[in-house]
Image (cartoon, rainbow, N blue to C red):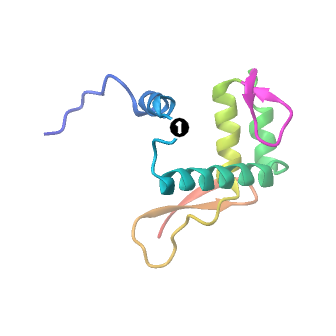
């Protein structure tokens, strides 16, 4: 039975706690390798997109500096700002995880001119 009551702890709070609690070497080698591959992919995407207009707009639109890295930039932001700019950069140039061949559902299609995704039915 479904309920409209929200959980006491959100996934956004639970996930980092679980990650921090991991002990080095406790994950299977294949899982560790996949995490490393994904990290390299995200950093590469952020570096590739660092000079795009949509990343510059995201960076310029954030007021709160802080200690967190914005990949490919000297400026540092608070955690929310770095997550926003890095997330924008990581997704703006990511074309390898899309499914267009006969799959049902919805997918994001990047709009290179404006850096805004448009939702399309696949």
Residue 57 picture location, percent across and down = 78, 40
When asked about the image quadrant of residue 15, the answer is top left
Kindly identify the residue that appears in the image at 39 percent across and 29 percent down: 10
Residue stretch rendered in magenta on the structure: 65-77
* Residue 72 forms part of the magenta stretch: yes
Quarter of the image that includes the N terminus: top left
Callout 1: SS: loop
Horizontally, residue 117 falls left or right of residue 66, namely: left
Q: Is residue 39 above or below residue 18?
A: below
Residue 36 picture location, percent across and down = 61, 51
Which residue is at the front of the view, 23 or 121? Answer: 23
Residue 76 picture location, percent across and down = 79, 28
Q: How many marks?
A: 1
Which residue is at the front of the view, 101 or 68? Answer: 68
Which residue was labeled with disc 1?
A: 24
Residue 23 picture location, percent across and down = 49, 34
Horizontally, residue 19 falls left or right of residue 45, namely: left
* Residue 11 forms part of the magenta stretch: no
Kindly identify the residue that appears in the image at 54 percent across and 56 percent down: 34
Mark 1 nearby-residue class (10 Å; few <14, some 14–19, many ≥20): few
When asked about the image quadrant of residue 8, the answer is top left
Q: Is residue 63 above or below residue 57?
A: above
Which residue is at the front of the view, 114 or 17? Answer: 17
Residue at the limit of the structure toward the front, as seen here: 25
Kindly identify the residue that appears in the image at 70 percent across and 23 percent down: 78
């Amino acid at each position: 039975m479904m309920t409209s009551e929200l959980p006491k702890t959100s996934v956004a709070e639970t996930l980092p706690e679980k990650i921090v609690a991991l002990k080095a070497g406790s994950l299977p080698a294949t899982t560790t390798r996949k995490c490393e591959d994904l990290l390299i992919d995200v950093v590469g995407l952020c570096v590739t997109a660092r000079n795009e207009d949509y990343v510059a707009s995201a960076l310029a639109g954030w007021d709160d500096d802080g200690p967190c890295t914005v990949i490919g930039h000297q400026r540092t932001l608070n955690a929310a700002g770095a997550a926003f700019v890095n997330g924008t950069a990581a997704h703006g140039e990511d074309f390898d995880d899309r499914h267009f061949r006969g799959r049902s559902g919805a997918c994001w299609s990047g709009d290179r001119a404006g850096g805004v995704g448009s939702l399309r039915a696949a």
